[in-house]
Image: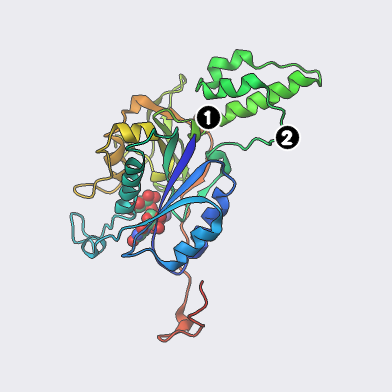
Amino acid sequence: PTIFVITPTYTRPVQKAELTRLANTFLHVQNLHWVVVEDSPRRTNLVSNLLEKAGLNFTHLNVETPKSLKLGLSWIPSHTPRGTLQRNLGLHWLRDSFSNTAPPEGVVYFADDDNTYSLELFEEILSDNFNKPPHFQAIAMDGKTRQEIGGEIGIDKDKDESVRESTCMSVKLECMEMMRYTRRVSVWPVAFVGGLRYESPKVSPAGKVVGWKTVFDPNRPFAIDMAGFAISIKLILEKPHASFKLEGVKGGYQETSLLKDLVTMDGLEPKAANCTKVLVWHTRTERPTLVNEGKRGFTDPRVEV
Ligand code: UGA
Ligand code: MN
């Protein structure tokens, strides 16, 4: 399965640093396609060059957020929708790309350019030195849960081939718990949002999502940050009109505005060890102090930062 990562981004002093950090993370992830959508009237050289050099599969798009929205002249004064039109364009590109071809197996993930992503969020990386037994790929690709095939994990203490097989299998089973193996919509905790160390879906002992461990408005249909879910490509294509809404969306309801058209809480798949691990952090980058640049600029403007 392919992971399509949609990243909205905009021009500011730290942009290249943010995108460099993100590219360095994604370079460790197999089968990843990076859809970078600039909030700008045209695609910039800075982002184009960075993407060309990064060594990732990518698509480079742009759409500018209208000034009227940025100034907060719409429904909620002072609330600017950040990255909304850009994410929608990314969804549009996906639907457009696979309208006439068989869609790839995979997921969409919305990754803001300033967050911090553990590689385990995508999947643990299996060393190719493992001698993969032939049945093991088949089991993993079946999409069965760990519990369902638990009985098949041999615990042979001898240091022979079967031990290597079972180690290998259990690693691969962990992988299945990550976003790449999403059937419809998967969810997991996100750190540093909602005034908490982390927010998390509430998971029942049976492994179902039954609510939200948040302080800010836990009665939202989907009380989850943008970084806390992934959607299967299949579902995105099945529901061609699902998108993030701009109008009439209260603060904290942007995620809900998309997800309510795709799933119900009942259909959510908890990942990250049943939502017991934090694998993504909603970090925010401090604006650098550039006061000594002065009005005309002190440093060489030809040097890209
Ligand atoms: C929070 C959420 O985590 C975001 O997913 C949500 O879009 C945002 O609030 C919101 O209120 O709309 P926060 O850290 O406050 O995130 O937002 P940013 O990281 O500043 O922006 C989210 C994404 O949109 C970033 O990838 C950023 O590069 C992009 N963005 C931001 C634009 O494309 N244009 C802008 O004018 C501002
Ligand atoms: Mn952010």
> Is 220 rendered above or below residue 250?
above
Residue 192 at x, y percent in the picture: 46, 48
Residue at label 1?
Answer: 177
The figure's colour scheme reads rainbow
Q: Residues within 10 Å of mark 1 (few under 14, many from 20)?
A: many
Q: Residue at x 70, y 22 (%)?
A: 165
Say whether residue 259 is left or right of residue 72: right
**Residue at horizontal 47 percent and vertical 74 percent from the top:** 289
Q: Residues within 10 Å of mark 2 (few under 14, many from 20)?
A: few
Residue type beneath disc 1: Glu
Mark 1 CB near ligand 1 (8 Å cut): no
Quickly name the residue at label 2: 129
Can residue 286 be seen here? The reply is no
Number of numbered discs on residues: 2
Give the camera-side residue of 281 and 141. 141
Dot 1 and dot 2 residues touching (CB under 8 Å): no
